[in-house]
Amino acid sequence: MPHTLSTEMLTAWLRLSMTPGLGPISAQRLLSHFSCPLAVEQCSPQQLAARIPKAIYDGLLVARGEAVTLHIHQALKWALEPDQFILTPDQSAYPAQLQHTADAPIVLYAKGDLARLKQPALAIVGARNATADGLEHAHDFACTLAHHGWCIVSGLAQGIDAAAHRGALHAGLTVGGTIAVLGTGADVVYPRQHAELTRRILNTRGLLLTEFPLGTPARPHHFPRRNRIVAGLSHGVLVVEAALKSGSLLTAKLAVEMNREVFAIPGSIVSPLSRGPHALIQEGAKLVERAEDILEELSTFSPPAFTFAKRSAPQTLTTAFTADAASKAEPRSPVWDAIGYDPVTEDTIQQRTNMLPALLQCELLSLELNGDIARQPNGRIVRTRRRS
């Protein structure tokens, strides 16, 4: 539980956060002229006009109007419900890792278990339209890291984000867990198909976190703001798959500006989703092939003992991303070898194997039914690995 603020002080923080045109940096400048947000709240319009620029003054007057006051009352009521919190920078529960960034949010809305904010965190981000391999990498890296006590932070988006959250959940209730940073209000599920994932996060002592007021819908310009929180909460950011111009690369660049570590998983040289990670590696990001590469790099921040009692990792997870385990899991088939690691057409497989078409179709069907391969929407075939 965060230490309790008076209703008046919390109201002042909320009004500051809802002031039009007043972002985190300009809010910090404003507070440098006042002792606290309550001092701003208690100033008369005449006093404000004499002390601050007109643009900020106009915004503060709008924020004192009926519409913003109604939103504040709704937020205060929301925070009375169990496991729902409004965090401000003067509360101990406000994440210290984020508080030290240049544009730390004025207010955070949190839903779930605040203890997750006390754990060392690692962000995993990547493409929404990820490949089967990318989704599996995100899941398994997250699962292994969570087993070692790291809290996995991501943005609840489709693709890599969702796979990372699910991987952390797969690790179990008593280990690292996950934090989903939203680009909407805390009472809005986006995308809608992640309603069940959201419930799972909350039911397993995870946390939803956002700076956007209740009821705020998803808007394109919200996600860069969300990404800076993802980076700011974390000791490092892992990029799994990303195009050259993507929000994931923006998150990585923000992480660099915040002196966080950046990690990237390399991929196929012909895949457009490998270009982002490859560009980061060229710029100095650490190339990683196993979760242990990250654990070694961040050993200084090894998670200390915390309230979630640890348990030993299941046998199925201790072998993740080792060459021996991968080779044991691979089916013995000339078609499997011919597919390789990049999506390929049936014609390419036939040329590589010289199999009769009917026999090739039987082998492909067997692999597909066994869950070893999948057909992409464009007809190409890609390897998959079944997950427990």
Image (cartoon, rainbow, N blue to C red):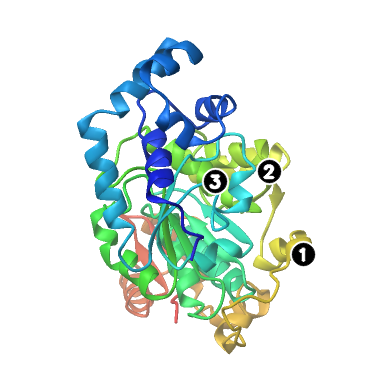
Q: Are marks 3 and 2 in contact (CB under 8 Å)?
A: no
Secondary structure beneath dot 3 equals loop
Q: Which amino acid is tagged 3?
A: Pro
* Residue at figure coordinates x 63%, y 38% from the top left: 279
Q: Is residue 314 above or below residue 269?
A: below
Q: Is residue 258 above or below residue 342?
A: above
Q: Is residue 337 left or right of residue 196?
A: right
The residue that label 2 is drawn on is 281
Q: Is residue 88 visible?
A: yes
* Residue at figure coordinates x 54%, y 41% from the top left: 251
The residue that label 3 is drawn on is 89
Q: Residues within 10 Å of mark 2 (few under 14, many from 20)?
A: some
Residue 76's x, y, as percent? 31, 52
- Find the distance from the CA under tag 1 to the CA under tag 2: 21 Å
Disc number placed over residue 299 in the picture, else none = 1
Which of pointers 1 and 2 lies earlier in the amino acid sequence?
Answer: 2
Q: Quadrant of residue 14?
A: top left
In the foreground, 152 or 110: 110
Q: Is residue 340 above or below residue 43?
A: below
Which of pointers 3 and 1 lies earlier in the amino acid sequence?
Answer: 3
Q: Is residue 29 left or right of residue 322?
A: left
Secondary structure beneath dot 2 equals helix
Disc number placed over residue 373 in the picture, else none = none
